[in-house]
């Protein structure tokens, strides 16, 4: 995801141990994990609400029928007469 390798993770953990302390590091990791999970749940709920709302607006506005009507109105039927009557010149 962030393209972080094993060495970078070890450096980050080492700095975290030094700053936070080895006793508090597991609690911090757990809190970050819970926060990230809550963020993902909230984001997914918001995304679902937006999708549901757009679907209800689409149904209310009857967008499917409107799209078909627009498509029918803008459809261009071209009738090309390919039967051309070419006669050779009778006068030599």
Image (tube, grey):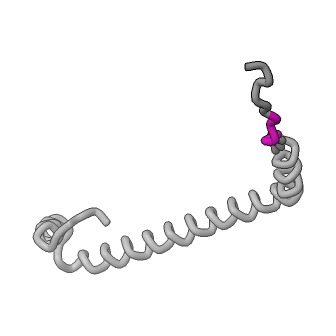
Q: Residue at x 80, y 36 (%)?
A: 84
Quadrant in the picture for the N terminus = bottom left
In the rendered image, the vertical position of residue 9 relative to residue 82, given as above or below = below
In the rendered image, the vertical position of residue 11 relative to residue 68, given as above or below = below
- Near-viewer residue (56 or 28): 56
- Residue 67 place in picture, x, y as percent: 82, 51
Range of magenta residues: 80-85
The quarter holding residue 5 reads bottom left
- Near-viewer residue (34 or 53): 53
- Residue 78 place in picture, x, y as percent: 81, 41
Magenta highlight on residue 83: yes
Magenta highlight on residue 42: no
- Residue 73 place in picture, x, y as percent: 87, 43
Q: Main secondary structure of the magenta part?
A: loop
Is residue 14 left or right of 2 when viewed as pictured? left
Q: Residue furthest front?
A: 92
Q: Residue furthest top?
A: 91
Q: Residue at x 47, y 74 (%)?
A: 37
In the rendered image, the vertical position of residue 47 relative to residue 77, given as above or below = below
Is residue 66 left or right of 14 when viewed as pictured? right
Q: Residue at x 17, y 77 (%)?
A: 22
- Near-viewer residue (21 or 65): 65
Q: How many marks?
A: 0
Quadrant in the picture for the C terminus = top right
Q: Residue at x 66, y 67 (%)?
A: 48
The quarter holding residue 15 reads bottom left
Is residue 92 left or right of 74 when viewed as pictured? left
- Residue 8 place in picture, x, y as percent: 14, 66
């Amino acid at each position: 995801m962030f393209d972080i390798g094993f060495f970078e993770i070890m450096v980050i953990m080492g700095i975290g141990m030094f700053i936070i302390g080895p006793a508090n590091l597991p609690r911090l990791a757990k809190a970050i994990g819970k926060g990230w999970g809550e963020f993902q749940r909230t984001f997914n709920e918001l995304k679902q609400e937006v999708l549901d709302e757009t679907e209800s607006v689409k149904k209310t506005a009857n967008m499917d029928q409107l799209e078909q009507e627009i498509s029918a109105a803008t459809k261009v039927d071209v009738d090309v007469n390919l039967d051309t009557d070419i006669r050779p010149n009778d006068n030599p």
